[in-house]
Image (cartoon, rainbow, N blue to C red):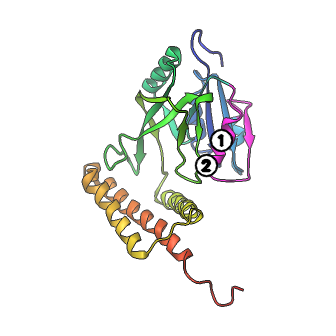
Amino acid sequence: MNSPAKRATVTAALIVKNEEKNLKTCLDSLADWVDEIVLLDSGSTDRTEDIARQYTSHFYTKENWEGFGKQRQAAQAYVNSDYVFWIDADEVVTAELKASILAALSTQASNTAYSVNRKSWVFGRFITHSGWYPDRVTRLYRVNEGGYSDDLVHEKVLLKEGVATQPLAGDMTHYTYDDLHHYLVKSASYAKLSADQKQKRGKTTSLSSASLHAFACFVKMYLIKRGFLDGKQGFLLAVLSAHSTFVKYADLWVRQQADRPDAH
């Protein structure tokens, strides 16, 4: 992969595990314009590595899982370019987004990072309301000007003081869930990590608080964020998100209860 003249270099970075279904489509959207692709795997048992090595030799493994934030930090340590562009295996760069990224790399504005807008395909349609769109996330920045937080889940990019974020044109397509089972498995995993994180920080909760958070989640998504305009999928997402919110807080509450009598 050769860099066009007069622009900064960029590495596409991914953290992956068992992504054989999505990975080829993702990497196809990167291969003709990034200078390097770096993948950090956390223990795939499918064809993820085989697919990845068709696009790059920079495939690494870190199975000592310490959370999403730490995993991204470890992946960034392998990046040797001016900029890093973060993408997940279930995301695809569109032509418009690619053009705006290349324009930013040519401009090389100082003290500037860039956000991209994700557009999610869920249960048979693109979601354009429900608080899911626009969905801006910081994904492109100079390697020496940013990095990810230590959070177990919902990790975020931390930029050096004075670095501003500018929006890029074009959407990144996000194929977030294969089916309802995939949603439930994924949301259960995130709920556990969220409870782990809150417990580690000494947070506590109650079932009434869990119920209120769940109710507020539904109202916000379906009414305030106009999820009803996303049709039946919008209603389903609002219900599922309320359920996931309840489970996240209920899990933390359960951990506060007494151990079983014969546990010691």
* Residue 150: assigned label: 2
Quadrant in the rendering for residue 214: bottom left
Numbered circles on residues, count = 2
Does 135 appear above or below 227? above
Q: Quadrant of residue 57?
A: top right
Image coordinates for residue 234, horizontal then vertical, percent = 32, 53
> Within 10 Å of the Cα at label 1, are there few (<14), some (14-19), or many (20+) other Cα atoms?
some
Query: Which residue is drawn at the image coordinates 54% and 47% (left, top)?
Result: 155
Label for residue 117? none
| Quadrant holding the N terminus | top right
Residue at screen point 41% across, 66% down: 243
Extent of the magenta region: 53-80
Q: Is residue 258 visible?
A: yes
Farthest front residue?
161
Inspect the image, locate mark 2, and give the three-letter code of the amino acid beneath it. Asp
Tell me if I can see residue 29 in this picture: no
Q: Name the residue under label 1.
A: 73
Q: Quadrant of residue 32?
A: top right
Asked if the stretch drawn in magenta spans residue 224, the answer is no
Secondary structure state at the residue bearing disc 1:
helix
35 with respect to 174 (left or right): right
Identified by mark 1, the residue type is: Gln
Residue under the point 65% across and 30% down: 37
| Residue 5 locus on image (x, y percent) | 59, 9
Residue 165 lies, with reference to residue 74, above or below; the image says above
Q: Position of residue 49 (x, y in %)?
A: 71, 41
